[in-house]
Image: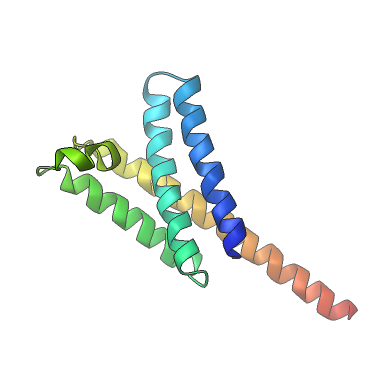
């Protein structure tokens, strides 16, 4: 995936996260934020390693989100709490997986369509 597209995707993820927080109250922004948090990790992983396959990127993003969540069972330094959180919440684990699977599906679909277009170009070429 081209880095410019990945960077643009990361910006869209941040805008979505801010929008969800601004528009809704209650559990919707909380759990949407969890999924988007994992999506941002996915985007950063793909930006850093552009050849990273969707399954690997999903595993990395979900795994890192889970590690951060389980770290909340211990003591998170005050300076890191705004980014990493401070309270373990088991449902968050599900929403991290939802974010990773959504990114995996979108990334795989993008790669598939790109491959299909290249095959069509080769047939016509």
The extreme right residue here reads 124
Percent across and percent down for residue 102 are: 50, 49
Viewed as shown, does residue 104 lie left or right of 75? right
Query: Which quadrant holds the N terminus?
Result: bottom right
The extreme front residue here reads 79
Percent across and percent down for residue 91 are: 29, 36
Query: Which quadrant holds the C terminus?
Result: bottom right
Q: Is residue 71 above or below residue 45?
A: above
Which one is nearer the viewer's eye here, 38 or 9? 9
Q: Is residue 33 above or below residue 67?
A: above
Q: Quadrant of residue 122?
A: bottom right
What's the image's color scheme?
rainbow
Q: Residue shown at 19%/47% (left/top)?
A: 70
Which one is nearer the viewer's eye here, 27 or 40? 40
Percent across and percent down for residue 66 are: 27, 50
Q: Residue shown at 54%/45% (left/top)?
A: 11
Q: Residue shown at 49%/40% (left/top)?
A: 14
Viewed as shown, does residue 7 lie left or right of 72? right
Q: Residue shown at 23%/35% (left/top)?
A: 89
């Amino acid at each position: 995936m081209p880095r410019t597209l990945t960077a643009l995707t990361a910006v869209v993820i941040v805008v979505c996260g801010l929008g969800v927080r601004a528009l809704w109250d209650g559990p919707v922004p909380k759990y949407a934020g969890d999924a988007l948090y994992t999506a941002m990790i996915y985007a950063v992983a793909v930006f850093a390693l552009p050849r990273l396959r969707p399954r690997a990127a999903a595993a990395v993003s979900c795994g890192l989100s889970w590690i951060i969540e389980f770290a909340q069972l211990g003591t998170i330094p005050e300076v890191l709490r705004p980014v990493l959180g401070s309270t373990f919440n088991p449902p968050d684990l599900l929403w991290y997986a939802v974010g990773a699977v959504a990114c995996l599906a979108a990334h795989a679909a993008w790669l598939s369509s790109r491959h299909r277009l290249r095959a069509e170009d080769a047939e016509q070429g």
